[in-house]
Image (tube, rainbow, N blue to C red):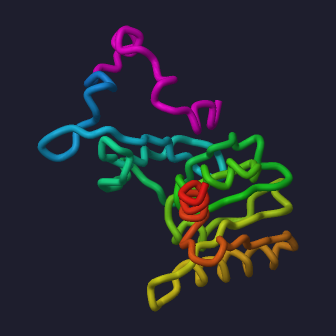
Amino acid sequence: MPGRNAGRTLPELPSPRTAARRGRNGPPLSSGLPLGQGTAPAMMAEIRCVHTGEFLGVHRTALTADGRKLGRKVFGSAAGGGVMLDPLAAARPTLVVGEGIETCLAGRQVGLRPMWSLISVGNIGTLPVLDDVIRLTVLAEVDTAPNRPSAAACEKVGARWHAADRSVDFLFPPDGAKDFNDALMMQRGAA
């Protein structure tokens, strides 16, 4: 069933005993995941094909003990894929997409659903028109690079979807925030 595990958190994974019984042996979750010469806590997410829901790979964000990002890595492929925080079947007739997982999780906290993280700005720009999705909402990011990759990706996906007679909306973070996760963190800091 495509996307059935998408969006689950690590505590919901099988116990080490259950995983071993299923032939999945690895370090206990409490010890962290291998990272270079040591281990680190990590956020793991399945990457699935945006058309079929077929498994393409895993996105890993290594974290410090206090939750800050150490680094990201994709195992497998992210091209043409995304982290389906909501299942493929839920992406009808509307879909909300963003670049980063954290940005998309922040969007879900304010009720934006169904939601997918497309992992990269390149995947946003190349997102094909999807059957049964008539309205796409893109969580845009504030560009800091001179070549404005987020703006370019928004223009590309907007043109493609408009040419297919689909609605496209772009939501931008509030002033002072690079993305919706930054906005959420700023809001929490002010509370």
Residue 44 in which image quadrant: top left
Q: Is residue 155 above or below residue 58?
A: below
Q: Position of residue 174 (x, y in %)?
A: 66, 73
Task: Quarter of the image for the C terminus: give it.
Answer: bottom right
In the visual, does 45 lie left or right of 111? left
In the visual, does 97 lie left or right of 185? right
By secondary structure, the bulk of the magenta-drawn segment is best described as: loop
Q: Position of residue 124 (x, y in %)?
A: 60, 68
Q: Residue at x 60, y 82 (%)?
A: 151
Q: Position of residue 10 (x, y in %)?
A: 46, 30
Residue 131 in which image quadrant: bottom right
In the visual, does 36 lie left or right of 123? left
- Direction left: furthest residue: 37
- Asked whether the viewer can see residue 166, the reply is yes
Q: Is residue 12 magenta?
A: yes
- Asked whether the viewer can see residue 80, the reply is no
Numbered disc total: 0
- Direction bottom: furthest residue: 146
Residue 7 in which image quadrant: top right
Q: Residue at x 45, y 17 (%)?
A: 14
Task: Quarter of the image for the N terminus: give it.
Answer: top right
Residues rendered magenta in the picture: 1-25
